[in-house]
Structures are given as structure tokens and as C-alpha cells.
Amino acid sequence: GEGRAGGAPAEFWGTPAYPYHRDGHVHFGHDRGPEAWGAKLAEGGRATGAGDLDLARTAYEDGLRLLDEALARLAAEDRAKKLEDPSLRAALVDAHYNLACFLSLASDGRDRPGANPKPVEAAEGERLRSEAFAHLSRALAFGWRDRAHLQKDADLAPLHADPRWEELLGRLRD
């Protein structure tokens, strides 16, 4: 979407726990390591910023999957503690928000903002919109609160006619 790509605090990506950055690239010594998800989310943010939305979508999806796998291996108390980390929450907001944008565009037959739409079967469009709303809900759960940005983000325009859009906006009212 417009704005939040890679918006997690800089200290999240630069800590020794996330040593995958050299010369602006992600290098994996082992792609299933305990923090490989962080490298994938960082890769998604950089790819979004560079306009490579296909790579960004894949990296975000891979990062979230790897994080889910890592969290599943933790005891419930440790999992809850990890999910309280503000830097992790910011990274999750970014990943889920940007995935919602990519899926919203895809539901309208676009692969990037401003692209000419291609035909999308109704069932596929609905599936993509449902996934977009699920990711937006997760972004809200992890702390997204910028209602004005949500409303003006052109990437999300394909969702505006859906009744779930007003429901989502209602969750952001003060």
C-alpha cells in the first residue's frame, strides 16, 4: 500500500537477532533458522519499496508462514510474550497491511497500482477480497490505527464496495 512498506522501526531490522543484511541484500545462511521470518519480512519491505510487488508478496507470505511455524514451536507463555514485542508487532502490521493491498489489487485484476485490470472470475475475486480483509483484520489486531490512510489508500479501493469495508472502518472509530 501507500506508505507502510518496510515501516517497522529500524532497530528491528538491524539487531544481532536479524543478521541477514549485507550490502542491502538478504543473505540466508539457513532459510529455516529461528529468525528467517524476520529476514523474509525485511525482504518484503525492501521489495515493496523497490516496486517489485511479486517478490514482496512472496517474501511477506513466506515470512508470515515461517513466523507461524516458529511461534508454533514455542510454549504458549513464550509465544504470547514474543507477540507483545512492539518491533515484531510493527513488522506484522506492515506485512499484513501490504499483503491486503496486493490481494485487493489482485481481486480487481491488477498486479500493481495503476495497471490496467485483467478479467478475474467472480469466485476468485471474492476469495482474494476475503483474504485481503483477513490480512487487514490481522493488521488491526497487531496495532494498525490509521483510519485516514486506510480510507485514502488506492490499493484498497477494490474493497470499498464490499460490506466488510464499512465494518472494518467501524472497528477503527474512537
Image (tube, helix red, strand yellow):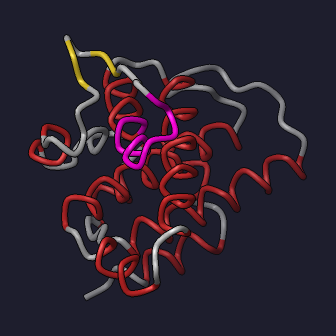
Q: Is residue 102 magenta?
A: no
**Residue 72: x, y in percent?**
55, 69
Q: Is residue 36 magenta?
A: yes
Compared to residue 75, the image places residue 61 above or below, namely above
* 99 displayed left or right of 39: right
**Residue 97: x, y in percent?**
43, 53
Image quadrant for the C terminus?
Answer: bottom left
* Quadrant position of residue 117: top right
- Residue drawn at x 79%, y 56% is 126
* 63 displayed left or right of 125: left
In the rendered image, is residue 156 in sight?
A: no
**Residue 153: x, y in percent?**
38, 47
In the rendered image, is residue 159 in sight?
A: yes
- Residue drawn at x 15%, y 41% is 16
Q: Residue furthest left?
A: 11
* 12 displayed left or right of 164: left
- Residue drawn at x 17%, y 48% is 12
**Residue 157: x, y in percent?**
53, 49
| Residue range highlighted in magenta | 30-40
